[in-house]
Amino acid sequence: MRGFCLMLFRIGPAAWVGAATLFVLITISLTRSPEFDSEMRMRMSLARFPSFYVVEFTLLGTAVVAGFFARRHGELGRLRSWLGLGLVTVALLGAIADYFLVYRPLAKMMADRTLDDTFRTLHETSKHGNFTIVAIVFVAAVVINWPSRAHRRMKPA
């Protein structure tokens, strides 16, 4: 069981960094495309972002639970287990705060077509907040996935 939890703990953060990167690249290409007007871009944003948060909460939430149970596996050691778990937990709490305090008001403004200075401020806050969350998760993924000393000492046959 601990081995399975360790696997989930390692996969979740790494998968989230990849998924978030892909999401950002797609978003940038769509917003810069001359094929879509501002109305269509807004509708696409309203359609895409709920999936972004579902994937984020699923991967990070699973990693937190799995990390809690995997912390005594021994593969990571006490420091790396707790550091990785702490970083993923901080990122998940940041994502929850972003969803309720930033995304939901932004989505309401987009649905109401209220794109004022408050919208722009929240949008910038969202960009910086999500960048910070992904950066924290990236560091967590490195901490969690870095080979253990035992694996580094092994010489290939």
Image (cartoon, helix red, strand yellow):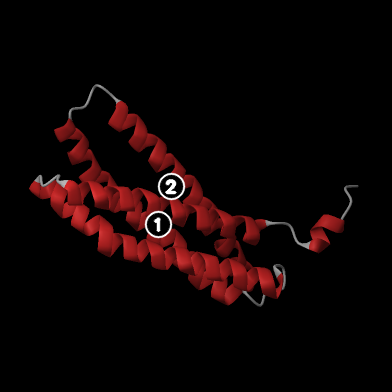
Q: Residue at x 57, y 76 (%)?
A: 69
Report the residue that reaches farthest toward the top.
34
Question: Badge 1: how crowded within 10 Å, few (<14), some, or many (20+)?
Answer: many
Q: How many marks?
A: 2
Assess disc 2: are there few (<14), some (14-19) or many (≥20) residues with their C-alpha within 10 Å of its C-alpha: some
The foreground one among 22 and 122 is: 122
> In the rendered image, which residue does mark 2 sit on?
20
Task: Report the residue marked by disc 1.
Answer: 56
Q: Amino acid at mark 1?
A: Glu
Q: If the image is split into quadrants, where does the N terminus sit? A: bottom right
Describe the element under mark 2 as helix, strand or loop: helix
Label of residue 44 in the image: none
Q: Are marks 1 and 2 in contact (CB under 8 Å)?
A: yes
| Residue 126 horizontal side relative to residue 131, left or right | left
**Comes first in the chain, label 1 or label 2:** 2
Residue at 15%, 54% in the rendered image: 108
Amino acid type of disc 2? Ala
Secondary structure at numbered mark 1: helix
Residue 143 makes an appearance in the image: yes
Task: Give the Cα separation between the discs numbered 1 and 2.
Answer: 8 Å
Q: Position of residue 22 (x, y in %)?
A: 43, 40
138 above or below 8?
above
Give coordinates of residue 143: x percent, y percent. 64, 60
- The residue lying at 38 percent from left, 61 percent from top is 95
